[in-house]
Image (cartoon, grey):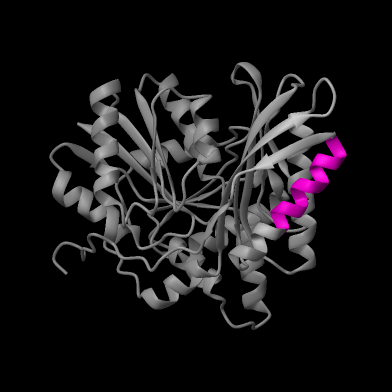
Amino acid sequence: MITFIPLTGFLGAGKTTTMTAAALALQEQGRKVAVITNDQGVELVDTKLVRSKLDSVAEVTGGCFCCKFEDLVEAIVALVASDSVDTVIAEAVGSCTDLQATVVRPLRQYYGDDMVVAPLTTVVDPLRHLAFARAAERGEPESDLSYLFRQQVTEADVIAVNKLDTIKADRAEELLASLRTSNPKATVVGYSATTGAHLEALLDAWQAPATNEDVVLDIDYDRYAAAEAQLAWMNQELDLTAAGEGFDATAWARKVLQELSVWAAEHDAVIGHAKITVEIADGDFAKLSLTESGAQPTLDRAADAHAPAGRAVVNARVACEPDVLDAAVTEAVKAADLATAVTSSATTPVSFKPSYPRPVHRLAPAGA
């Protein structure tokens, strides 16, 4: 019998960091853990970072788990067969919701003899949550993105508030208390996946019974699709060559994201996330991410050395038109090239807006 742990949560909440930290912690307890990343596109920055820390990693691309249900099942079966794992943690696309009905219940109904499905966990970025809450307090109409975020929280068995180290302690306690009041069926835990603080509370929550499994979302799929369609999804690969003996991969990636952050703030474009890896010699690579317009990038991994050449992968999810995002990233790359004495050669960007969500299964609670 294997354990499947499903994660959801808005773009930039820290699902990948949470999944990786939790997998390492469970391995220390003697579990054999595999993880699955998921995205609407391909060439995932996160998958490379996860593979640098964990041995058993798979990905489901080209759509969310709900629309790629059989792909998810195949990935689970392959991991169990090849690596003899007993636990699989999987993170859904950050723009996806309705997972209780489209993923959790189908897995329990069709594969319950071989699999224990842990409580559905929604990972929450406290700053993102507070931004949506402030808009509501000002009486602003609920945006489609805020609607999507609210649905993700509403269906959670476990609300996992990540990045608690980024806000003051009194504000953190207020946020946790507010979420417990507004979501009485959910278990609410706070932690930091980056530092590992209080991560054990999340692991404990996964051992408890699901408390919100009978939830039925009052979800408008047209509005859900509109929320997803607000975001342009862009993936691009670039070959980088130093003008001199070597270049700083970390500095190049940081400059790209800094420029993109400034552009997004100037154009009032919500950043779901933007991530870059730059791989240099011998498997060494830098990885940085950005989850808020006007903010500084976060360093997830620094490259240890300068190199004469490298290859970058850019994943950007921003609320704008795809061609506008392409142009913004192109200008950001030019600025980074100039600042770090690099010549870049880019592939044609793969840019799109997600198609209408059409889940393979959508099951009501037992007895409903």
Q: Is residue 200 visible?
A: no
Report x, y in % for residue 44: 51, 41
Q: Considering the image in quadrants, where does the C terminus appear? A: bottom left
- Report whether 247 appears left or right of 315: right
Q: What is the count of numbered marks?
A: 0
Report x, y in % for residue 71: 28, 45
Tell me what residue is drawn at x 35 percent, y 75 percent: 218
Report x, y in % for residue 286: 67, 30
Residue 198 highlighted magenta (yes or no): no
Q: Is residue 301 above or below residue 100?
A: above
- Report whether 266 appears left or right of 368: right
Task: Tell me which corner region of the image, top left, top right, bottom left or bottom right, holds residue 76.
Answer: top left
**Highlighted range, magenta:** 328-340
Q: Is residue 206 visible?
A: yes
Tell me what residue is drawn at x 74 percent, y 21 percent: 307
Task: Tell me which corner region of the image, top left, top right, bottom left or bottom right, holds residue 260.
Answer: bottom right
The front one of 278 and 18 is 278
The front one of 345 and 186 is 345
The front one of 354 and 216 is 354
Question: Magenta stretch mostly in which secondary structure?
Answer: helix
Tell me what residue is drawn at x 42 percent, y 59 percent: 96
Q: Is residue 219 above or below residue 154?
A: below
The front one of 349 and 356 is 349
- Report whether 118 appears left or right of 124: left
